[in-house]
Amino acid sequence: MKKTFKLLIMLTLVCSFVLSVSAFAADPGMVGNSVIKIKKPETYTSTTTQKEYYISGVTSSGVTVSVSRYNPFTGYFHLLYVDGKAAVQTAGASGLIAQKIYLTDGNNKIRIRTDSPDGKVTFLEVNITLNVLSLSDIQQSPIDIRKAIA
């Protein structure tokens, strides 16, 4: 009886935790939350051929925005450094934010953290895929793509 009761309590706690986490998940139909509205990328998943990429958004004056990238080897997000500077900005009177980042080949899992002056901290994650093979690469290729596909 005691084991069943403990198991029931444990399952209740696990279920309540899972439900509370999913309740705070970002809406996949819109890139943004109550603190920042991301303009670029336009969706949570994006693809580009440009190694130099700008993340932009609009927020309130005084909100600090920092950009981190997921490192699969460590299992953590690490603050990005671009041209020797940390990818951290505080929004001015206009609220506009634009942060240059350099993408690595393949999938780039990016976390945008906002710290508002009232102490509210939010996180938003986006995936930006850098395609290493662009149309110009295909056109300049000495291999006839039509023969390679056939």
Image (cartoon, grey):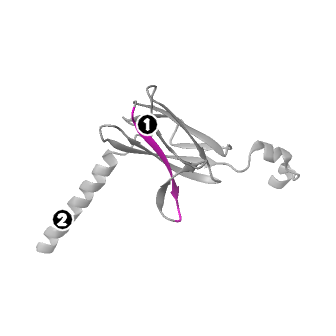
**Residue that mark 2 sits on:** 8
Residue 112, placed above or below residue 150 = above
Please identify the dominant SS of the magenta region: strand
| Residue 96 part of the magenta segment | no
Looking at this rendering, what residue extends furthest in the top direction? 94
Compared with 119, 15 (above or below) is below
Q: Residue furthest front?
A: 84
Residue 80 location (% of width, % of height): 53, 51
- Badge 2 marks a residue whose secondary structure is helix
- Which residues make up the magenta segment? 62-73
Q: In front of the other: label 1 or label 2?
A: 1
Name the amino acid type tagged 1. Gly
Q: Amino acid at mark 2?
A: Leu
Sequence-first disc among 1 and 2: 2
| 113 vs 8, nearest the viewer | 113
Residue named by callout 1: 32
Left or right of residue 112, residue 53 in this image:
right
- Look at the image and tell me whether residue 41 can be seen: no
- Residue ID at (67%, 48%): 131
How many residues crowd mark 2 within 10 Å: few (<14), some (14–19), many (20+)? few
Residue positioned 29% across, 37% down in the render? 118
Alpha carbon distance from label 1 to label 2: 37 Å
Q: Choose between 11 and 63: the one closer to the eye.
A: 63
Q: Nearer the viewer, residue 5 or 26?
A: 26
- Residue 25 as seen in the image, left or right of residue 39: left
Is 70 covered by the magenta stretch? yes
> Quick check: 49 above or below 58?
below
Residue 53's x, y, as percent? 61, 41
Mark 1 lies on a secondary structure that is loop
Q: Position of residue 45 (x, y in %)?
A: 54, 44
Q: Residue furthest left?
A: 1
